[in-house]
Structure formats: structure tokens, C-alpha cells
Image (spheres, coloured by chain):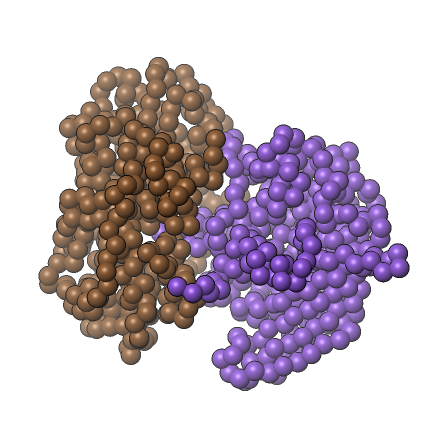
Chain colours: A purple, B brown
């Protein structure tokens, strides 16, 4: 059977990495390691440059819409590289028949979010395709940010050492469950709202006030578990996570129980993992808790020595197990 | 679906995950151990819970938990996937399936690959959803992939009865339901190093705990019907250890909030009205007499294989696979000549390689 692209090629881990390696990186002669943003240097100034496409279904969901998401996502990719996001491009692929009012709403939320994140949308493109050739609207955004020298190593995690502390800025899983609920028209008595937010202000405050930030990564597709595994592979170090200290909102937890999902694998659009020098972890948590996007910041684990690049989860009941990269997107289980 | 969920946590779940109680049970198990013990869990739900909560790390090394053939997806034969794939390629067919069957590989393809190639394959959470899809798509035929044990089979039976009641003519099932006790019997017949079973709680909610009474009676094995939370599982392990120590094996019910000795008579009646026992092939274990369920003749009109006969070559299970011996504790995965060669997580020959928690899959990913 001829090889074709499957949904798991877009899951963000496993087959996605394989696809990037075997098709894109090789053909484009790109250098490893690959990070969320490319780090470019010109006459002594460093720039971070990133691009992302947004195809969320449904287009509107509790806590945001595809427009807001397309700004936050790109801003966050720059922010976790340690950069200050500046300029954004936006290109639209719109399906014939799409409501102009809806388009206007989406564009307004992009403008709103750009204003909040203090970035400027400076260029763009529009294409309309025949009905059925895309699903309502797809948006691609690219972003450029300015990167100070002292932050230029953050996305590579080279400074990460055993003893470093893992911090996340709040509960995980809300975006994935909010979108799933909106897609399947599930009615929750406690509404689950996407955490979709630009986090560049949060990262800026943390970076300005602390010198021990060794790594940052946004917890999008594949969630916390996949980012931790990438960190372990990248650094060759072990990672110990404490399940009971990872914040998960109660309705998200409940729905995960019903569907057999693990919140540690669910996508977020407003969460970052910070890896911080142990002496600065209290300070980082305090700074984060003073920001609206970091009120529920929590220490969730630490980097450990040894030569095994594995992620070990200390479970809620006091057991231990390996926290794996899943083989593909989570599907509801029969048992 | 409307959820009533209030803080703190989900009501009546957190209570069964109490860390202190877990540590207490773990200590009592450690204190009760007098030799070595092998207990098998045969339900995929147990396997997942044991893995997810890190239960093995809370048990003394003298206790070995073996993951049996209890994940209905893992034991589904290659030929079944091949048939489902073949149906998905026909015109005007909608395949409805539970999520975890999507990735299971057949001979050359999987439902996931077929969907990527354009087949209409839809995930459902209940077979009644599949019936609804049939109602809304009268011009097409919906084939529901009816797999699973005594837990899901009554749902299929009820759906078929409802389809008849409503006169829905475009609904079919590709039936490969299985029943657990004959497989457990096959695993302990002959040589085996098992001391007892963590019996499947939800299967027993339907069949009643009496379905397992032959195990202590004929084979001298300890049995505890178990719930799915960490304290359930640990308490059951303690009960099993005590049964083995006392030399008086029996069927005890730990999961008493759901299980009785006689089970759910309504579900049993629906099940036997629609289905009858048959022999069935289990991935890695081969043909097990009386371990499957097929539609009774009176319900043939809903049987995909009778109404749309397929003309495909069916692949036999790989005879070199030693899943059965691994499950019995007689061999380890590395003893198998297929292991890591023609049997890998991407292309599994036996059930133990399919599930992420299966013995061979774990050995493959974490060799040590």
C-alpha cells in the first residue's frame, strides 16, 4: 500500500517528528536541533522567527476562536524562545460560503489579541477556495521577535542541569476539553473554557526578574507529557514529575475519567513549562502568580541526574511509572 | 451528556484513590507475603489502571502481576481487522467503531489508514450512536464493529433489538464479541505458573461472579472480582495473597458495589436472545472453543458477513507467536523468535505487543 499522510502525522509528536525529519528537514537541509522558533542572527542582532497554521474545528469555542488562537499561538512560540514578539503576518484560506459576519468577528478577535500582546499585524494574504476544499477557514500566522543575547539559549535547554525545578503556569487540559465539548455539543454543567492566551507578558516579567530560566516550552499538542519527554531527550537527563501537584480543573478531570483521557497529554493554548534554577523557583512562582495568566502557577517536578533520559511520574497514590510519549492521538477507549 | 461535577474532585472517585489507604494496603500486602505469587488481570481496564497509577511499584517484588488477554482490541484477530478494512473500501458503507480499534493493524492496513485514504470510518462511544447514524443515512449501510466482552456485548444485543423494533434496515454488525471464562480456562489448562486471577469487575457485573467458580473448583486458583480504582486493586491483591496462603481458593467479590453472584439477569437475557456461543480466534492465543458470540439465525439480517459476504483471503494467526506461554508465565518476551523482528508495536503478531501495557510491548520499548 502506498504511503499516505494520516491524522497522527499531525498529532505533534511521534509520527510528526518522523515526518519532519524524513521529509522536511532533510529536503530543506535544516539543522538540528529544531525548536519552536528559528533563531536568526544579523549583524549582531538576534531574531526569533516562527510560523504556524490554525485549523481548529469548531471555529468558535468557549474562551476563544480561531482568530484569537492564531495570534496567541504564534506569540507564544516566540515568547518561549525567550524573544519579545513584535510583528505578525496573517494569511487566510476561506471556504466559499463562509459568513462574512463570522469572518469579521474572527478578524476583530485577532486585532484585540494583537493589541493585548503588543504585536502588530503587518502583512497578510487572502485566498478563497471552492466549497468543500477547506473547512470554513484556515489561518496561518508567522511572527518575528527580538531576542536578547542572554536569552538566546533558552529554547535549546543547554543550561538545564539536575536539580532544576519544573513550573507550569496553571491547570492543564482546558483547551482540548473546551474544543472537544464544542465540537461534540457536550453540555457541561460547569463550563470548561479554553485557556487560549498570549503569554509574552508573563515570560517577559519572568525573564526580566530572574536569571535562572533554563528552558521554556508551550504545552500545545501532546500536552505536558510530550514536552517533558522532548526535554528529557534533548538534555539526556531524567525528569521526575509529581502527578498530584499538576493542577487540573475538576470538570476537565471528570471528563477525562469518562472518556479515558489523561490530562497530561491534552493540548493547551495558554500554558508554558518553565525549567528554572532551584534557587530561583520560589521567586519565579511568585512573579507568575502576580500575573493573570499565572495565578495558579505550580511546581510540578524537577530534573534529576543519572544517564537515563526518561520521565518518571510519581502518581497520586504514591506509585511510580514511566510517563511515555503516546503512540498517537488519544482516542476514547472501549475499556 | 450532562455532567454534575462539583469541587473537590469527582465525587466517589477520589475516595478510592486515598493515598493513606493505598499505603496502608501496600504495607499489609508486604507483611502478608510468604513466597512468590503470580496473579493475572484479564481486563484491559485493570491493566490500564495498574499502569496508570504505578501499582507495581507499590507491591513487593515477590508479587508478579501479569497482564492477560483482556483488552478486547488486543485480542481481536488480524482477520477481523482485514474484514473491517475490506468493508470500509466498499461504496456506500459507513464503518462505526470504538476509538481504540482505529490503530490496530491488520495484514496491510488499519482503519486509521483507510480513513486517511477516504473511507467513511466514524468513532462512536456507544453502538446506539451507530444506529442513529444509520437512521440519518438511509441511503448507506452502517456496519458497527461489534467487539468486546460481556461488558459491551449486551449493548450490541440491545441495539440490534432496537433496530428490529424500529425497522431500520441499513444497520449491520461485524460481530466478534468474546466471552472471558473460556479464555481464562484455556490459559490455565496444562502448564501454568499462575496462582490466581484479578477477575474482571465489569464482566462479572453482567455474568455474576459464579462465572469464575470453575477456577478455584477445577484448577485450585485464587479469584477476586475486582473494581478499577487503586484501592480496589490493592485490596484484591491482599485478598488473593491471603487465599493462596490459606490454601483455600475461592471466588471472592471485592467489587461488591457493582457485582453479585448471579449478575445482571436482564442483560444476560438480551444477550442470549440475540447471540449464541461459537469458537473464536484470539490474536496470539489461537482458536478457543466456545469463547466467541455470533448472531443467532433469527438475527442474520443484521450480520454484515451474511448480508455482504466478502471475498478476501484471511490470514491465519502466526503460529510461532508464544503469547499464550508468556501470559502463562512460562516464557518471557525475549524467548519468542518473532519478538522485535516480525513482531513489533507497529506490526504486532500477538496480543501482548498490541497494547502499550502488553508484556511484549513494554519489553520492546524498555529493554532491560
Q: Is residue B129 above or below residue B262?
A: below
- Residue at 80% in and 64% down: A86
Q: Residue furthest right?
A: A43
Image quadrant holding the N terminus of chain B, namely bottom left
Residue A73, image x, y percentages:
67, 61
Q: Is residue A173 above or below residue A87?
A: above
Mark yes or no: residue B279 visible: yes
- Residue at 23% in and 60% down: B313
Q: Residue furthest left?
A: B297
Q: Looking at the picture, tell me which residue is in the foreground, A9 or B294.
A: A9
- Residue at 19% in and 32% down: B189
Q: Is residue A89 above or below residue B344?
A: below
Q: Residue A309 occupies which quadrant of the picture?
A: top right
Q: Residue B326 occupies which quadrant of the picture?
A: top left
Residue A68, image x, y percentages:
66, 67
Looking at the image, how many numbered discs can be counted on the residues?
Answer: 0
Q: Looking at the picture, tell me which residue is in the foreground, B312 or B159.
A: B312
Mark yes or no: residue B152 visible: no
Residue B47, image x, y percentages:
38, 39
- Residue at 50% in and 48% down: A326
Q: Looking at the picture, tell me which residue is in the foreground, A335 or B286.
A: B286
User: Is A162 placed left or right of B223 in the picture?
Assistant: right
Residue B68, image x, y percentages:
31, 37
Q: Residue B130 occupies which quadrant of the picture?
A: bottom left
Amino acid at each position: 500500500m502506498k504511503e499516505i499522510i494520516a491524522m497522527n502525522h499531525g498529532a505533534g509528536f511521534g509520527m510528526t517528528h518522523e515526518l519532519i525529519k524524513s521529509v522536511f528537514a532533510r529536503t530543506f537541509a535544516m539543522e538540528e536541533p529544531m525548536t519552536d522558533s528559528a533563531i536568526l542572527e544579523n549583524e549582531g542582532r538576534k531574531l526569533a522567527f516562527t510560523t504556524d497554521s490554525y485549523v481548529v474545528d469548531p471555529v468558535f469555542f468557549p474562551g476563544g476562536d480561531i482568530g484569537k488562537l492564531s495570534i496567541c499561538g504564534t506569540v507564544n512560540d516566540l515568547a518561549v524562545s525567550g524573544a519579545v514578539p513584535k510583528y505578525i503576518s496573517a494569511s487566510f484560506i476561506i471556504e466559499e460560503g463562509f459568513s462574512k459576519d463570522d469572518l469579521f468577528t474572527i478578524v476583530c478577535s485577532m486585532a484585540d489579541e494583537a493589541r493585548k500582546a503588543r504585536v502588530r499585524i503587518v502583512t497578510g494574504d487572502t485566498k478563497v477556495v471552492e466549497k468543500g476544499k477547506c473547512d470554513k477557514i484556515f489561518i496561518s500566522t508567522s511572527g518575528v521577535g527580538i531576542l536578547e543575547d542572554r536569552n538566546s539559549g533558552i529554547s535549546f535547554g543547554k543550561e538545564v542541569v539536575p536539580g532544576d525545578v519544573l513550573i507550569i503556569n496553571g491547570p492543564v487540559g482546558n483547551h482540548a476539553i473546551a474544543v472537544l465539548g464544542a465540537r461534540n455539543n457536550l453540555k457541561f454543567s460547569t463550563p470548561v473554557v479554553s485557556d487560549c492566551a498570549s503569554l509574552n507578558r508573563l515570560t517577559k516579567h519572568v525573564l526580566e526578574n530572574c536569571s535562572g530560566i533554563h528552558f521554556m516550552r508551550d504545552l500545545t499538542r501532546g500536552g505536558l507529557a510530550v514536552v517533558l519527554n522532548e526535554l528529557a531527550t534533548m538534555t539526556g537527563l531524567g525528569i521526575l514529575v509529581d502527578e498530584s501537584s499538576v493542577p487540573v480543573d475538576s470538570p476537565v478531570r471528570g471528563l477525562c475519567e469518562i472518556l479515558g483521557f489523561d490530562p497530561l497529554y491534552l493540548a493547551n493554548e495558554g500554558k508554558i513549562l518553565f525549567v528554572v534554577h532551584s534557587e530561583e523557583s520560589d521567586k519565579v512562582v511568585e512573579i507568575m502568580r502576580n500575573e493573570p495568566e499565572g495565578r495558579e502557577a505550580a511546581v510540578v517536578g524537577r530534573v534529576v541526574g543519572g544517564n537515563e533520559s526518561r520521565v518518571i511520574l510519581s502518581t497520586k497514590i504514591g506509585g511510580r511509572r514511566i510517563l511515555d510519549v503516546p503512540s498517537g492521538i488519544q482516542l476514547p477507549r472501549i475499556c | 451528556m450532562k455532567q454534575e461535577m462539583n469541587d473537590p474532585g469527582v465525587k466517589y472517585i477520589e475516595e478510592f484513590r486515598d493515598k493513606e489507604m493505598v499505603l496502608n494496603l501496600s504495607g499489609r500486602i508486604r507483611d502478608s507475603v510468604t513466597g512468590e505469587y503470580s496473579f493475572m488481570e484479564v481486563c484491559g481496564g485493570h491493566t490500564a489502571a495498574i499502569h496508570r497509577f504505578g501499582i507495581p511499584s507499590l507491591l513487593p517484588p515477590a508479587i508478579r502481576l501479569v497482564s492477560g488477554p483482556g483488552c478486547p482490541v488486543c485480542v481481536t484477530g488480524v482477520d477481523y481487522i482485514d474484514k473491517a478494512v475490506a468493508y470500509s473500501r466498499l461504496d456506500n458503507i459507513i464503518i462505526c467503531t470504538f476509538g481504540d480499534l482505529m490503530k490496530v493493524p491488520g495484514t496491510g492496513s488499519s482503519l486509521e489508514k483507510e480513513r486517511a485514504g477516504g473511507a467513511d470510518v466514524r468513532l462512536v462511544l456507544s453502538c446506539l450512536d451507530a444506529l442513529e447514524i444509520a437512521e440519518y443515512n438511509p441511503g448507506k449501510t452502517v456496519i458497527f464493529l461489534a467487539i468486546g466482552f460481556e461488558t459491551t456485548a449486551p449493548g450490541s444485543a440491545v441495539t440490534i433489538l432496537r433496530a428490529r423494533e424500529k425497522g431500520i434496515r441499513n444497520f449491520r454488525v461485524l460481530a466478534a464479541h468474546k466471552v472471558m471464562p473460556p479464555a481464562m480456562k484455556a490459559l490455565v489448562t496444562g502448564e501454568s505458573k499462575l496462582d490466581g486471577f484479578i477477575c474482571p469487575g465489569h464482566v462479572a457485573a453482567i455474568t455474576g461472579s459464579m462465572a469464575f467458580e470453575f477456577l478455584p473448583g477445577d484448577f485450585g486458583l485464587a479469584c477476586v472480582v475486582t473494581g478499577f480504582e487503586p484501592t480496589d486493586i490493592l485490596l484484591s491483591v491482599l485478598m488473593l495473597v491471603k487465599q493462596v496462603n490459606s490454601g483455600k481458593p475461592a471466588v471472592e467479590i471485592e467489587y461488591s458495589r457493582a457485582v453479585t453472584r448471579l449478575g445482571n439477569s436482564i442483560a444476560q437475557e438480551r444477550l442470549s436472545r440475540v447471540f449464541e456461543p461459537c469458537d473464536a480466534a484470539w490474536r496470539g492465543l489461537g482458536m478457543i472453543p466456545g469463547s466467541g458470540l455470533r448472531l443467532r439465525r433469527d438475527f442474520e439480517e443484521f450480520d454484515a458477513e451474511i448480508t455482504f459476504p466478502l471475498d478476501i483471503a484471511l490470514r491465519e494467526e502466526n503460529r510461532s507467536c508464544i503469547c499464550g506461554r508468556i501470559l502463562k508465565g512460562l516464557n518471557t518476551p525475549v524467548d519468542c523468535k518473532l519478538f522485535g523482528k516480525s513482531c513489533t508495536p507497529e506490526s504486532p503478531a500477538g496480543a501482548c505487543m498490541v497494547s502499550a501495557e502488553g508484556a511484549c510491548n513494554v519489553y520492546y520499548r524498555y529493554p532491560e
